[in-house]
Amino acid sequence: MYGYYQQPGRRNEWIKSIFFGRNVLSRLILINTAIFLLTAVVHLFTWLFGIHGPYGLTVLGSFLALPSDLHKLALMPWTVFTYMFLHEGLFHWLFNMIMLYFGGILFTEYLSQRKLLKTYILGGLAGAFFFVAAFNIFPVFTSIRQNAVALGASASILAIIVAISTYVPNYTVQLFLLGRVKLKWLAIAFVLLDILSIPSDNPGGHIAHLGGALYGFLWALSLRNGKDLFSLFDRLNFPDINLQKRKYKRFDTSRPASGRPMTDEEYNRKKAATQAEIDRILDKISHSGYASLTKAEKELLFKSSKKNH
């Protein structure tokens, strides 16, 4: 599978593109990683001074994890968002980032970066709702509700995987030991595994996963039918956090003013800037129609379509 995220020739450029690329997927990975590292550093200092957080979490983690108890949740409403970026174990973070990276690549082969962000956030919120609702409805959780918390990006990631699997169910991927597998079977396997794992030592996590999966399925199904159940959130996007002035707004292969050939980094940066602009224009068309485009936006879209033919 090759495309916008094709691995550059040098390994350091590939790693840089994962964490610092000018796209939503890189921003999501970077935020998750930054919070993971910050939590670990704060934990080191609090541990040295004998300070421990509740629920077996780190001190910072206890402020970011989602509580199932409604009274605690009322005092910590921000946790419905922060929990989906919080990881406290190295392998938990690593596994989720691998899944997010490859799931995000598949997703953006067919859908925009902005839709990726929307699916991550709304899928995470659906997971939070399922988690809190289940722990306050089913009697089996009464004894542990007071101390139960949810954390991790898994619900958001499963929303992304199920969404793209619903949108292009017959897309095939190559899996180690299993060979070529259609996305729809992969998504079904993930969902069934979570359902069967609910009576385990992590019922809340598996229930949250199912919330994210249900959102991804319903949203992508509506998209396939020509509608978007959650179009209200189409303008959701990260702010531009780049402190340097953007040098490239459009993609072209002309040499810089100095006359020297472009480096791979300059080429990739130009290409990324134009792809992001095209994604924004396509989202604008979806939301407001082609007539809403400016002359410059129409010109860029026309030039891009000519290059792809």
Image: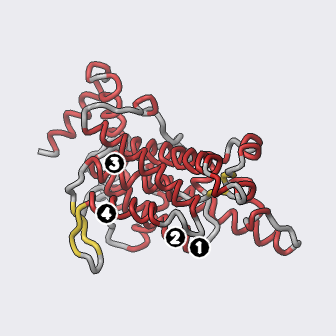
| Left or right: residue 59 compared with residue 220 | right
Q: Which residue is disc 2 drawn over? A: 94
Give the number of the disc on residue 90. 1
On the image, the x and y values in percent for residue 29 come to 50, 59
The amino acid beneath tag 4 is Leu
* Rendered view: 143 above or below 181: above
Q: Earlier in the sequence, mark 1 or mark 3?
A: 1
241 relative to 249 in the view: left or right: right
- Mark 2 secondary-structure assignment: helix
Which quadrant does the N terminus fall into? Answer: bottom left
**Do the CB atoms of the residues marked 1 and 2 lie less than 8 Å apart?**
yes
Q: Circle 3 — which element?
A: loop
Counting other residues with Cα less than 10 Å from the Cα at mark 4, is it few (<14), some (14-19), or many (20 or more)?
some
Q: Position of residue 77 (x, y in %)?
A: 69, 41
Q: Is residue 155 above or below residue 115?
A: below
Q: Residue at x 30, y 34 (%)?
A: 282
Q: Which mark is residue 257?
A: 3
The residue drawn where x is 66% and y is 48% is: 79
Q: Identify the image quadrant of residue 298.
A: top left
Name the amino acid type tagged 3: Ala
Foreground pick, 53 / 247: 53
- Which of discs 2 and 4 lies nearer the camera? The answer is 4
Q: Residue furthest right?
A: 49
Disc 1 marks a residue whose amino acid type is Leu
Callout 3 environment at 10 Å: few (<14), some (14 to 19), or many (20+)? few
Which residue appears at 29% of the width and 49% of the height? 166
Is 198 on the left or on the right of 164, as rendered?
Answer: right
